[in-house]
Amino acid sequence: MLTHYKVKTPFYFVDFDILAKRYSYLKQAFSRTAGETLIAYSYKTNYLPSICDFLSRLGSLSEVVSGLEMKIAKRLGIPGSKMIFNGPVKTEAEIREASRLRLMLVNLDSFNELKILERNRINGQKINLGVRLSFAPTDHRDESRFGFSVDDGSALKVCRRVARTRGFKLRALHFHLGSVTTELSRFTEAIEQSIGLMRDIEDYAGTKIEYLDVGGGFALETTPPLLQETHYPTLDAYAQTIGRAIAKSARIHGVEVPILIVEPGRALVGPAVQLVSRIISCKQKRNARYLVVDAGTNLVPSCTYLRHQIRLVGREGLRRMYCVTGPLCMESDVLSPAAALPRVKEGDIIAIEDVGAYSITFSSQFMRPRPAAFGLVDGKLVCLAREEIEEDIIRRMSFRRMKATSAH
Ligand SMILES: Cc1ncc(COP(=O)(O)O)c(C=O)c1O
């Protein structure tokens, strides 16, 4: 199908049917076990406006972590009441904008941020706040650098301060355990501690917390780690663990079951994008068959640590192993050390699968401008982001000549 379109390679291809299916699968999996669940799409995973818009039309909230992402949401006409603002740095201007837009939640990350918020309160208006939590690790890990520690009491301290400040409304507790969190017990423990904290806040300030936002971090089963065998939980297993832990902890601590918010990125948008690339040369060396293609790991950084399937577009046949490499002048530019493909030739088109997460937003202009992104609408390929041109890169740099003085 993709070979029928005369488009310059490489390019990203977004499949909105897959995106819709992933969204409803996630929504149903969590709603089945946790009751009312709000999905807040993590913009930084892939902030192509058409993707963000599509998901919000399906009912998703927008989880943003910068002024840039807030601006994209605003341009799409998404109201503040459907935006959650996270992240370790929120500038004064971003916080001013967040309170002007009356966001659904601003999740606090530090005491300094709280001070900025205090300065930017608007008379007669409440700022809806959440508090990001971190937990003392029960294994070899370090405690997360984000948010407020539950263990050392700073989480309770900040919640008390928010609860007694005029102009603030404490509505949520939030955590994100990290991208690709495979140990389900970490969710159970974090939920237990968060709901315990809800009890303390209710006792201290009479404030009932409406939302528990458990972040994202759900693994994508089709992209296992490159180097080790790891068992990934299914989406249903994440949903069941989280739903059950909330119900149990709420019962133990005698609090009302909070509304669950999840902030998926990778598991939602990952499968919906492919990177389409052309084989530039085929090389047989003593130890392997190499393919050099026109897309590098700078366009899919996760190829260096996850196994992405690679498919030959338009032809089937008996498969053999190829090492698929990119165009970068770096030995490490390997998209797959062992891709099973039918016999290929120069000029053939391949698709690197499941590249929707942290590819477009993580891509760099190393050696060449970044490629376009397309989607299919009524059988027609439509442009979602134009390709960069060399001039885009050159224009922002100064060509000022420095005086060439030699060192003595
Ligand atoms: C606060 C927060 N929420 C959600 C996500 C999305 O994570 P993932 O793509 O692993 O689902 C991230 C990613 O780092 C994050 O930092």
Image (cartoon, grey):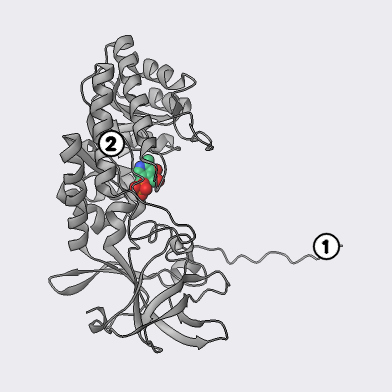
Q: Quadrant of the N terminus?
A: bottom left
Asked which quadrant contains residue 242, the reply is: top left
Is 392 situated left or right of 374 in this image?
A: right
- If the image is split into quadrants, where does the C terminus sit? bottom right
The response on whether ligand 1 sits within 8 Å of label 2 is: no
Circle 1 packing at 10 Å, graded few (<14), some (14-19), many (20+), is few
Q: Mark 1 points at which residue?
A: 407
Residue drawn at x 27%, y 53% as measured from the top left: 268
How dense is the environment of label 2, judged by Cα within 10 Å: few (below 14), some, or many (20 and up)? many
Which residue occupies the foreground of this view, 295 or 262?
262
Farthest left residue in view: 378
Q: Where is residue 397 in the image (x, y as percent from the top left)?
A: 53, 63
- Judge whether 291 appears above or below 22 on screen: below
Disc 2 element: helix
Residue to which mark 2 is pinned: 242
Of badges 2 and 1, nearer the viewer stands 2
